[in-house]
C-alpha cells in the first residue's frame, strides 16, 4: 500500500522520527528523537512565578495524564526537543536548544513545501518561547503554540517528564505535595470562616455581656464547646493561628486513620465469623437480593 501522508513518508525515511496524532483534531506531528533530551540545572526547581516566556515548564492540559494541580500538568521544556509540523502547506522544524550560558533557546525553521527538509528559507532563534512564530504563521483564533509543538500529547509528555524524573527524582512529587498542602490549608481556612459566621447565629447559652469602660464598647461573650468566644474574636498572633490550624489538621488525620483501622478490624471480624459459620455470607447475599 503506497504512503501518501507526509508524516508517513518522513517516518519511513528516518528511523528517529515518530509520528503522533494531536488529541483534539486530525492533524499529525513528528517527534524527532535523533537528539537526546537533556534537562538543565534550571529544571531542578519548578518556579510557578516565573515569566511564561522564559520558564522551563508550562502548565498545560494533557488528556488522560494525572494533573499536578486542579486543572493542568507541568510539562518540561527540554534541550533537544524537536518536532516537525505542517502548517498551511509549510514544513517547519521547531527545536529547543541551549546557549553558552545554559539558557533555553527556541528555534523555528521554515522549509516551505520541501518535504526533504534540506532547503530552509527562514530561521529564527529567540530566548523567549518561540517568539514571533504566531505572527510568522498568521495564527489566529484558539490555536496555541504549546499545542502546535505537541506538548499536550500524552505520549510525548510522558517521555519529557521521564527525563525529569530520572534527573530530579523528587521534583514532581514535591510539587504535588505542595499543591495538596495548599488545597488542605485553603479548605480549613474556608471551613473556619463559615464556622466564625455561624458561631453567634446559634442560640448559645450562658451569654455574658462584659462590662464597658469609657474607651471600649460592649462585647458579647458566649461559651461554645467549653471555650469562651467573643463577638470581637479571639486575639491571636498569625503564628498562633497557624499552630492551631496545624493542630486541627493533625487531629483530622488522626481521626481518619482511626476510621481506617476500625474498618480493617471490622473486615477481619467478618472474615473470622465467615470461617466459623460459612453460611453467614450466603445469608447476607440472599437478604441483599431480597432487599433489592
Image (cartoon, rainbow, N blue to C red):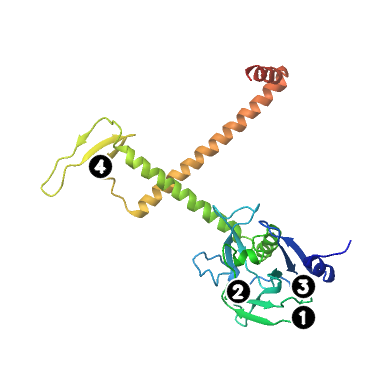
Packing grade of label 1 (10 A; few <14, some 14-19, many >=20) is few
Task: Compare marks 1 and 3 and give the one earlier in the sequence.
Answer: 3
Task: Compare marks 3 and 4 and give the one earlier in the sequence.
Answer: 3
Label 2 to label 1: alpha-carbon separation: 20 Å
Q: Say if mark 1 contacts mark 4, CB within 8 Å.
A: no
Check disc 4 and report its element: helix, strand or loop: loop
Task: Compare marks 1 and 4 and give the one earlier in the sequence.
Answer: 1
Q: How many numbered marks does the figure carry? A: 4
Q: Residue furthest left?
A: 214
- Label drawn at residue 133: 2
Q: Which residue is mark 1?
A: 118
Q: Position of residue 240 (x, y in %)?
A: 36, 51
Residue 120: image quadrant is bottom right
Label 1 to label 3: alpha-carbon separation: 16 Å
Task: Compare marks 4 and 2 and give the one earlier in the sequence.
Answer: 2
Q: Position of residue 263 (x, y in %)?
A: 59, 32
Residue positioned 54% across, 71% down in the render: 53
Residue nearest the viewer, comparing 204 with 136: 136
Check disc 1 and report its element: helix, strand or loop: loop
- Label drawn at residue 231: 4
Label 4 to label 2: alpha-carbon separation: 59 Å
Report the side of 292 relative to 233 (left or right). right
Residue positioned 32% across, 53% down in the render: 237
Residue nearest the viewer, comparing 100 with 292: 292
Q: Position of residue 252 (x, y in %)?
A: 48, 41
- Label drawn at residue 136: none
Label 3 to label 4: alpha-carbon separation: 69 Å
Q: Is residue 247 placed above or below 172 in the rendered structure?
A: above
Q: Nearer the viewer, mark 3 or mark 4?
A: 3
Amino acid at each position: 500500500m503506497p504512503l501518501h501522508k507526509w508524516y508517513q513518508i518522513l517516518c519511513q525515511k528516518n528511523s528517529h522520527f515518530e509520528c503522533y496524532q494531536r488529541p483534539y483534531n486530525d492533524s499529525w506531528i513528528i517527534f524527532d528523537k535523533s537528539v537526546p533530551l537533556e534537562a538543565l540545572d534550571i529544571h531542578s526547581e519548578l518556579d510557578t512565578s516565573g515569566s511564561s516566556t522564559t520558564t522551563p515548564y508550562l502548565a498545560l492540559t494533557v488528556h488522560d495524564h494525572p494533573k499536578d494541580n486542579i486543572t493542568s500538568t507541568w510539562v518540561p521544556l527540554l534541550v533537544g526537543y524537536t518536532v516537525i509540523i505542517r502548517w498551511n502547506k509549510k514544513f517547519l522544524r521547531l527545536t529547543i536548544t541551549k546557549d553558552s550560558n545554559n539558557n533555553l533557546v527556541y528555534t523555528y525553521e521554515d522549509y516551505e513545501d520541501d518535504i526533504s527538509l534540506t532547503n530552509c528559507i527562514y530561521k529564527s532563534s529567540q530566548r523567549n518561547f518561540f517568539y514571533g512564530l504566531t505572527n510568522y504563521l498568521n495564527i489566529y483564533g484558539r490555536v496555541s503554540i504549546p499545542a502546535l509543538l505537541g506538548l499536550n500529547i500524552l505520549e510525548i509528555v510522558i517521555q519529557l517528564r521521564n527525563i525529569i524524573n530520572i534527573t530530579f527524582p523528587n521534583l514532581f512529587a514535591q510539587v504535588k505535595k505542595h499543591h495538596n498542602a495548599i488545597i488542605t490549608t485553603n479548605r480549613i481556612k474556608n471551613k473556619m470562616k463559615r464556622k466564625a459566621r455561624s458561631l453567634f447565629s446559634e442560640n448559645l447559652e450562658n451569654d455574658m455581656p462584659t462590662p464597658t469602660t469609657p474607651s471600649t464598647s460592649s462585647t458579647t461573650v458566649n461559651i461554645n464547646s467549653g471555650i469562651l468566644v467573643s463577638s470581637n474574636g479571639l486575639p491571636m498572633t498569625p503564628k498562633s493561628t497557624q499552630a492551631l490550624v496545624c493542630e486541627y489538621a493533625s487531629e483530622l488525620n488522626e481521626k481518619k486513620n482511626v476510621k481506617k483501622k476500625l474498618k480493617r478490624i471490622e473486615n477481619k471480624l467478618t472474615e473470622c465469623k465467615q470461617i466459623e459459620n460459612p453460611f453467614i455470607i450466603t445469608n447476607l447475599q440472599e437478604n441483599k437480593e431480597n432487599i433489592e
